[in-house]
Amino acid sequence: MKITIHYFAMLREQARRDEESRETNATTVAELYAELTQAHGFTIPAGNLRAAVNDAFVKMDAPLRDGDVVTFIPPVAGG
Amino acid sequence: MFELSERPLDGVKLRATLTEPAAGALVIFEGWVRNENEGRPVTGLFYEAEPKLCASEMEKIAGEAKAKFGVLGVRVAHRVGQLAIGEMAVWVGVTAGHRDAAFAGCRYVIDELKKRLPVWKKEHYADQTTRWVGM
């Protein structure tokens, strides 16, 4: 299935892109992040991330469906 | 209610958007870019945010502040992009009938947004190095 991924902050820098579309066999958000860590050398542990699918926060074990847009949220530091 | 801005925040304009006839108190918090963090000299900050998730999470936080403290109006603006020392990074204004609720509500909003809004900050140091805060 095809998933679109949006990157921010350190993940954007490490992936060298704002977003990408990717064919994947990952069935959950966590599996997708593991695959992307292999591809891009991400250094943020999965346990320190949050994720959103189609603009709503989800748990890392949330299932993926064809066409989903996934945003990974590194540790936040606003204010 | 919430905005991300690539340009300097104008506290006077933001304050003017909080018009509640029942309000007897307004508490404003401004967060500024400081020249050091954990003992390291800082020369500037870069802020980045995810707009849609920021807006929806801020709606939740404002709703919680209203439910918990009975505040009337909540208005928040956050800067994105490159900021210099002394610039305003965040503006929070909370109105309420009386000062206790306004102080408590403003404190709640800034504390929660720092923990929950998808906003990221890269510190630039005097020795030319940088670091994403918290990563």
Image (tube, coloured by chain):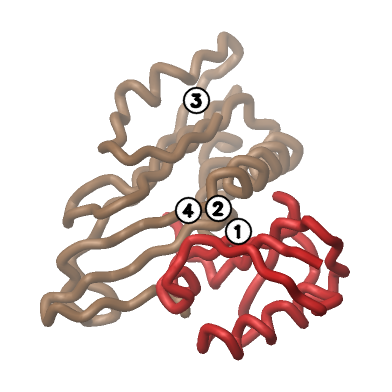
**Neighbours of disc 1 within 10 Å: few (<14), some (14-19), many (20+):** some
Chain A palette colour: red
* Residue B130 visible in image: yes
Tell us which disc is closer to us: 3 or 1.
1
Residue kind at label 2, given as amino acid type: Leu
What is the crowding at mark 4: few (fewer than 14 residues within 10 Å), some, or many (at least 20)?
many
User: Residue flagged by tag 1: what amino acid is it?
Assistant: Arg
**Precedes in sequence: disc 2 or disc 4:** 4
* Mark number displayed over residue B113: 2
The image's mark for residue B132 is none
Label for residue B49? 4
B2 vs B66, left or right, is left
Badges 1 and 2: C-beta atoms under 8 Å apart?
Answer: yes
Label 2 residue SS: helix
Contact (CB < 8 A) between labels 2 and 4?
no
Q: Residue at x 83, y 75 (%)?
A: A28
Q: Which label sits on residue B116? A: 1
